[in-house]
Amino acid sequence: MNAVSDSFSEGDWIIYPKHGLGKTLGFEKQVFSESEVEFIVVYFEYEKMTLRIPINKADELGVRSISDESDMKAALTALRGKTKIRRTMWAKREKDYKDKLNKGDMLSIAEVLRDLYRGADDPEQSYSERQLYELALNRFLRELVAIKNIDLSDAKKKVEENLQKI
């Protein structure tokens, strides 16, 4: 066993940056070319997908426990911050947003949400902006639901209130 298998148990919520919130189903060992590999088995409800993550690669892949209350509070505060609109080409901004999403931490996801949020009186988003916004929103909401133990509609209200800076 290593630090990852020692730090997670069956039924724990975890974050895998490429897919967001998942629940550990357990651990398994498989043999490949006479070498035994231990995996953490994670189910991602939103994607309806089960993934086996090699434990020896978990840290490198950014697998982490869900955020605590103080991290969530900081992320919700970041939603109320000033939008950072850069005047660079969309391809560069898109790459930066995707990098932040794939980093997987709540503060980075909150920054993407804040910067891509469009209120009722704001100009419309492009299709790719909307896709990134929805991805960030879904990841943020799922972790908020798990941390606060609230339902999705309450989580959406909380996020919208913070984005609208009420």
Image (spheres, helix red, strand yellow):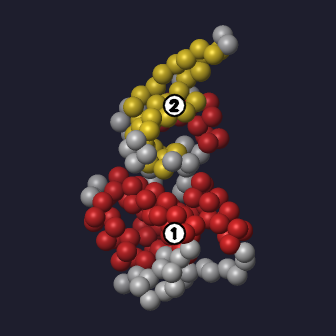
Residue of label 2: 52
Sort mark 2 into few (<14), some (14-19) or many (20+) by Cα contacts within 10 Å: some
Q: Identify residue for label 1.
A: 130
Q: Is residue 34 above or below residue 111?
A: above
The x and y percentages for residue 38 are: 55, 23
Report helix, strand or loop for mark 2. Answer: strand
How far, Cα to Cα, is label 2 from label 1?
A: 30 Å
Image x and y of residue 39, in percent? 53, 27
Q: Which amino acid does the dot numbered 2 rest on?
A: Arg
Numbered tag placed on residue 48 in the rendering: none
Q: Is residue 102 visible?
A: yes
Q: What is the secondary structure assignment of the residue under circle 1?
A: helix
Identity of the residue furthest to the top in this view? 34
Which of disc 1 and disc 2 is earlier in sequence? 2
Q: Residue at x 52, y 19 (%)?
A: 29
Residue at 55 percent across and 69 percent down: it is 127
Q: Is residue 23 above or below residue 92?
A: above
Residue at figure coordinates x 46%, y 57% from the top left:
139
Q: Nearer the viewer, residue 26 or 85?
A: 85
**Which image quarter holds the C terminus?**
bottom left
For marks 2 and 1, give the one nearer the viewer: 1
